[in-house]
Amino acid sequence: MIHVVKQGETISSIAFDYGVSPERLAYDNQVSGEALAEGQALLVLIPEIIHSAAPGETVYSISRKYQTSVLQIYRNNPYLLQSVLKPGDVLAISFTQPKMGDMELIGYAYPFISDDILDKVLLYIRELLVFSYGFTRMGELIPPRGEERLIEKAREMGVRPILVLTPFSESGTFSNQLVKAVSEDLPMQKRLIENLLFTVREKNYGGVDVDFEYILPEDKDGYAAFVANLQTTMSAQEYSVSVALAPKISAEQKGLLYEGVDYSALGKAADHVFLMTYEWGYTYGPPMAVAPINKVRQVLDYAVTEIPTEKIFMGIPNYAYDWPLPYEKGVTKAETIGNVQAVHRALQYGVPILFDEIAMTPYFRYISEGIEHEVWFEDVRSIQAKADLIKEYGFAGGGYWNLMRPFRSNWLYFNSMFDLE
């Protein structure tokens, strides 16, 4: 259930209405105390079977009793990751909501992601895309610091760690000249692919994700050929290759983000693709939803004409923007915040949260130090709308940019609605 808070409602009053634990309702939605923002969306999980832990029981013994998996027990009760199971702990074994089928979730993370966030998201995702390796004009790789922790934790949880390759130079900045080099210099491309294969083997990655942007139009064919050559080499050793795609709405779409990206060729070359269906609202742009459903649908309608649906992961943003007003093009810069942080901000300033039925995205305005602000973010309603799109189009699943910020109701929503791969 998704409950939209009315004026005067509290965690306790809503929990009473649904017959659920107020502590669990607050935990699932990352709410502190009783106060809620008017218009705030809450995920209400109604247990079908609950179990009160007895002395001597373990998560494993409880999973055997109910013929379910240890992983599913943790998915239903992620708070168990933070403490040892104690007598009297109440576990949700299953929920009343019937599952809507299978779902695969993947997501990007930087190596400095906190342990607490990482441990929880690994319960629900299939692939962890570790951001990011750069490379030189000689085809040598530039590894990120701290990747080993992510690989080890992912493998412990049965999640495939994926090496993300981006055209970052030795200075750590983006370079489309590196894109040109790998597209046109075949000896350099061969060395890069050889180094990728060696690193994937040595570090215990499960494959490579190619995340190139600003590809020049003249490099379109060479870039697609690079992805195809990489996939041929990797698949021979049973590693996967995916590619991130800018959100195009037609083959002829103009602009530096789009002209070098051939959906058809890249869809054929890669094992699967990640559609970057976000950033309509962005740091230097005017205030609007980051991933408005009406705009996302335009990208999907084009993508399915070029790429098999079972290869597509639809991008989902896990962040929000806070714009100071009035917006002035080239001057105004939005603050990037988390979705949970956005709700806390609405509560802090005592303003109602509104919902745009066209974008299917929540937003609100507030005033701080005499300056008006506009915030667009994601909540469980906008996530439900995105999940509905994934199922409608028959995609492989959803992919997150990125996993760095907490968003517990999102993960619990997918867990309650789908059988996660």
Image (spheres, rainbow, N blue to C red):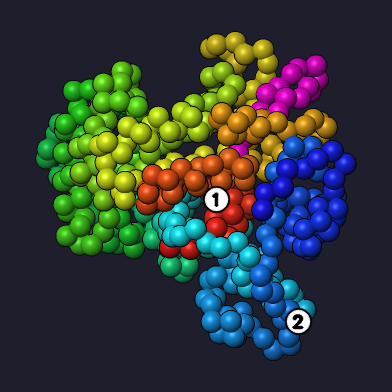
Name, please, the residue furthest toward the left: 187
| Viewer can see residue 336 | no
Which residue is nearer to you in this view: 343 or 207?
343
Indicate whether 55 appears above or below 294: below
Q: Residue at x 20, y 50 (%)?
A: 231
Which quadrant holds the C terminus?
Answer: bottom left
Q: Is residue 81 above or below residue 193?
A: below
On the image, which quarter does residue 227 sit in? top left
Nearest the eye: 37 or 344: 37
Q: Nearer the viewer, mark 1 or mark 2?
A: 2
The reply, left or right, for residue 248 in relation to residue 217 is right
Q: Amino acid at mark 2?
A: Pro
**Which residue is pictured at 84% across the width and 38% down the height?**
7
Question: In terms of sequence position, does the residue under pointer 1 or pointer 2 come before the other?
Answer: 2
Q: Is residue 84 left or right of residue 293?
A: right
- Is residue 197 visible in the rendered image? The answer is yes
Q: Position of residue 304 (x, y in %)?
A: 31, 39
Magenta-colored stretch includes residue 365: yes
Q: Which residue is mark 1?
A: 113
Magenta highlight: main SS:
strand
Q: Residues within 10 Å of mark 2 (few under 14, many from 20)?
A: few
**Secondary structure of the residue carrying numbered label 2:** loop
Does 162 lie within the magenta span?
Answer: no
Which region is colored magenta? Answer: 364-378
Residue 103 image offset from top left, x and y in percent: 44, 57
Q: Taking 380 as reference, is 5 left or right?
A: right
> Which residue is under mark 2?
87
Left/right of residue 304 with respect to residue 338 in the rendered view: left
